[in-house]
Amino acid sequence: VHQSIDQTVNQALSSGKGRQGLIEGFHETLKALVSSEAANEIFIVDKEGKIVAQRTAHGKPVTPSIQDMERIQNIIDLNAHDQWSYPFIDREKNAIDTLMPITLDNHVEYVLKATYDLGNLQDALRAVYVPVIITVLIVIFISLSNTVALSTKIVRPIKTLHEASKQIAKGELGLQVRVKTNDEIEELARTFNFMTRQLARMKEIAEDANPLTKLPGNNVIHEEIDHRIKDGKKFIVVHCDLDNFKIFNDGYGIGAGDVVIRMTATLFREALEKCGGPEDFLGHEGGDDFVLVSTPQTIKPIADFITTEFDRRSKLLYSKEDQARGYILGKERRSKGDE
C-alpha cells in the first residue's frame, strides 16, 4: 500500500496535473488495492476532514468512526510523518486498522486508512510462512562456512523449523519449537513461536465470536476479566439483558429479535466510543445477554447513554398499534391458555 501511494504521488507531481491529478490517481490506486484483496476497506481524507477517495470490498460507502477521525486529525495536526504507518487493532471487528500519512513538501496533506481482516491475514500468513522461513534460513546457511558449526547450529535448527512450518501450515497452531543456539537462529525460533501463539489467539477469538454481533464470546469474556483481576486494577463488570425479550420475539418473530440484538450491540459500541476509555471491553454471552467492562470513572456516563438511547430507539421497533396501546400481548410460559 505504501509503495503504491508513493508511486501515485510521484506520478501526479511529475505530470504537472496538480491536486486534481493526484486525487484521480488516488481513486485508481485504491481500486487496484481493494481488487487485489490488499485491504477490505480503504479511504483517504484531506486536511479538512473530507474523504477524497474511497473503496470497499463490498462496494458500500465508507462511514468513518469518531475514533477514526480523531486519530486522523491528530496525525494532521501534529504533522506526524516520522513513521510511514500507525497500526491499531480493532478487536470488535477482528481487524487491523492502519493509518498512513501522505506528505507533500514535507507536510501531511492527506491521511490514508486501510482496514485488513485478521482472518484474511491469518490465511495469508499461513500461505507465506514456509517459503519465508526457508528463504531466511538459506541466507543464514550460505553466510556461514564452518562445517562443524554448520551441522550442529544450522542444519538441525533448519530442519526443526522447516518441519514445524509444515505442521503450522496444516493448522497445528499450538506448536512451539525449541532451538538453543545462542545466536540469530534462536532469536528466529522465538519469533516463530510468538507468531504461532498470535495465530492461535486470533483463531480462538474468531471461533469464540458471536455469529450475530461478531462480539467476543464467553471464553474471551472470562479471559478478559481474569486478566484484569491479575493486574490488580479497579474495574466494573456490567451484565446486561433485555427485559421481556421472549415475549417480543414470540410476537414479532425471530428476525425482528435479531434486529434488536444487533441494535443493542451497536448501541453498546457507540456508548464505549463516546463515553468510555481505550481499554474498555464489550462481549456477547449469547441471546440477549451482554457483558461490558469499564472503569469506575466512565461507567455512569456509559450506562446513562445506553439506557437513554435504548428507550428512544426501541420504540421504533414496535408496530403503530402496539405503540399506541403502550404494551404488547404475549402468552405466558406457565399457562398455555392464558395471555
Image: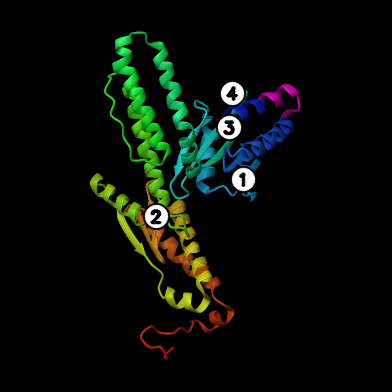
Q: Which mark is residue 1?
A: 3
Mark pair 3, 2: CA separation: 31 Å
The quadrant of the image that shows the N terminus is top right
Q: Provide residue 196's location: percent of width, then percent of height.
A: 37, 36
Q: Which mark is residue 56?
A: 1
**Mark 2 crowdedness (10 Å alpha carbons): few <14, some 14-19, many ≥20:** many
Mark pair 1, 2: CA separation: 26 Å
Q: Secondary structure at mark 2?
A: strand
Reading the image, the residue beneath label 2 is: 282
**Mark 1 crowdedness (10 Å alpha carbons): few <14, some 14-19, many ≥20:** many
Mark pair 3, 4: CA separation: 19 Å
Tell me the mark number nearer the camera, choosing from 1 and 2.
1
On whether residue 25 falls in the magenta region, the answer is no
Q: Earlier in the sequence, mark 1 or mark 4?
A: 1
Q: Earlier in the sequence, mark 3 or mark 1?
A: 3
The residue lying toward the viewer, choosing from 281 and 339, is 339
Q: Earlier in the sequence, mark 4 or mark 2?
A: 4
- Taking the image as shown, residue 286 lies to the left or right of residue 85, namely left
Q: Amino acid at mark 2?
A: Leu
Mark pair 3, 1: CA separation: 15 Å
Q: Secondary structure at mark 4?
A: loop
Tell me the mark number nearer the camera, choosing from 1 and 4.
1
On whether residue 17 falls in the magenta region, the answer is yes
